[in-house]
Image (spheres, rainbow, N blue to C red):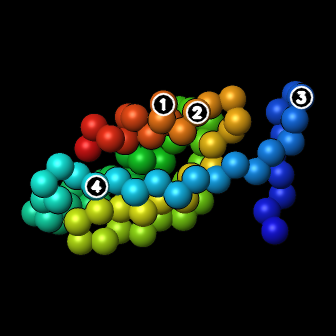
Amino acid sequence: MDRPASLSHATWVCKYHVVLIPKGRRRTLYAQLRRHWGEVFHHLARQKESTIEEGHWLSDHVHMLIAIPPKYAVSPVNAPMNRF
């Protein structure tokens, strides 16, 4: 089992399964940018003190398991990633 993370007032284990689907499921876009997206997603997650625990790239969408501290809601952490 994962070790709980801690803040000043609580210990926590909050993980969310997030699926990102590009508009129109453009497979050609994925083929061209797939190599760079991993770095971008990890950088965006770090900005909100989150980590991407696991990720799976499929031909037209991405599955990610993201650990997000309880002081952030899922939608603001996921919002920058939805621009892709």
| Circle 4/circle 1 CB separation < 8 Å | no
Circle 4 residue = 21
- Nearer-N-terminus badge (3/4): 3
Badge nearest the viewer, 2 or 3? 2
For residue 81, side relative to residue 23 (left or right): right
Q: Amino acid at mark 4?
A: Ile
Residue at 28% across / 37% down in the picture? 83
Q: CA distance from mark 4 to mark 1?
A: 17 Å
**Viewer-side residue, 36 vs 73:** 73
- Nearer-N-terminus badge (4/1): 4
Query: Does dot 3 land on a helix, a strand or a loop?
Result: loop
| Circle 2/circle 3 CB separation < 8 Å | no
Circle 2 residue = 73
Residue at 42% across / 63% down in the picture? 63
| Circle 2/circle 1 CB separation < 8 Å | yes
For residue 80, side relative to residue 52 (left or right): left
Q: Quadrant of residue 3?
A: bottom right
